Amino acid sequence: MNKKYFFFDIDGTLAVGTPGDQYIPESTKRTLRQLKEKGHFLAIATGRSYAMAVDHMEELGFENMVSDGGNGITMNNQLIEVKPLNYDLCVQLIEECQAKGYIWAMSPDNSTTRLAPDERFYDFTHDIYMETKVIEGLNPRDYNEIYKVYIACFAPEEEQLETLKKLPWCRFHKEYLFVEPGDKSIGIKSIVDHLGGQYEDVVVFGDEKNDLSMFINEWTSIAMGNAIQPLKDKATFVTKDADQDGIEYACKYYGWID
């Protein structure tokens, strides 16, 4: 069997349960061990920033990762690169938010803290995913790079933001959306190219909207049974739910493990 290059989303794919109470099914842990023993390459592919994902990577026993929605590369536990968002468009979006009265925050670096100009972002979202630090008079032009922008509003209010249409974004919470890189396939291809592998030997697992970008025809795409329907429609194969031994089931189906 050719060496395979496996890339796994975290939430809803590797990890199941509610935020703050997630766990990795024993069947998934067993499968990851067997894949590694057989010499396959294993990596996480997540939309999370490197800073928000590196602990999960280590806890799950991974050494490789595509982070930042495809813009971050980690290999052998070493961060290789993280590319920021388009700076000019992010500044333009924030200034449009200010002009139209939208609540916003931003991440000018790859850390676990986001910056906001006042208390309104936390008051509106009550979000504890990241620490929100208030910087009075916060001006995006005072920073050289922008990695994420956060806009607090309910759908479909974001449709009034014209600049948002030019940037990748995703909504995971009803109270706010993330402006973040959105093509995991870019990071996957970078790693496989670096290792001299073939795209036809890539296998990706996912379940949500931000996994759509890595479900492409060049490789095998496996949707979890709990995945959204658009992802299942693009998948090469639909396996069982993540908490019903879905990863193990797919790997046995294809003969990657015994």
Image: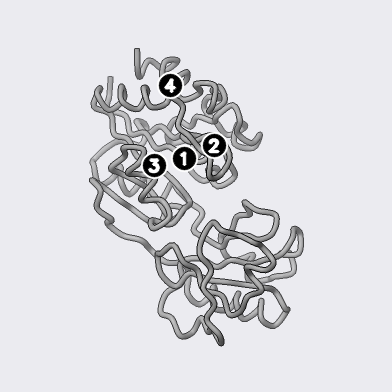
Q: Residues within 10 Å of mark 2 (few under 14, many from 20)?
A: many
Q: Residue at x 54, y 26 (%)?
A: 243
Helix, strand or loop at disc 4? helix
**Disc 4 to disc 3, how far (Cα)?**
17 Å
Q: Which residue is mark 2?
A: 12
Q: Amino acid at mark 2?
A: Gly
Q: Which residue is mark 4?
A: 27
Quarter of the image with the C terminus is top left
> Which disc, if any, is residue 9?
1
- Mark 1 and mark 2 in contact? Answer it, CB < 8 Å: yes
Q: Position of residue 86 (x, y in %)?
A: 48, 70
Instruction: Please say if the residues under marks 1 and 3 sit with CB atoms less than 8 Å apart.
Output: yes
Query: Residue at image x 66%, y 62%?
Result: 125
- The Cα atoms of the two marked residues, 3 and 2, are separated by 13 Å
User: Disc 3 marks which residue?
Assistant: 44
- Give left or right: position of 163 versus 198: right
Residue 241 percent location from the top left of the image: 57, 25
Q: Is residue 1 above or below residue 233?
A: above
38 or 124, nearer to the observer:
124
The answer to whether 188 is drawn above or below residue 116 in the figure is above
Give the left or right position of residue 95, taking residue 101 as reference: left
Q: Quadrant of the N terminus?
A: top left
Asked which secondary structure carries label 1, the reply is: loop
Task: Look at label 3 and name its amino acid.
Answer: Ile
- Element type at mark 2: loop
Query: Label 1 is placed on what type of residue?
Result: Asp
Disc 1 residue crowd, few under 14, some 14–19, many 20+, Cα 10 Å: many
Q: Which of labels 4 and 3 is toward the front? A: 4
- Considering every residue shown, the one lying at the far top of the view is 258
Q: Earlier in the sequence, mark 1 or mark 3?
A: 1
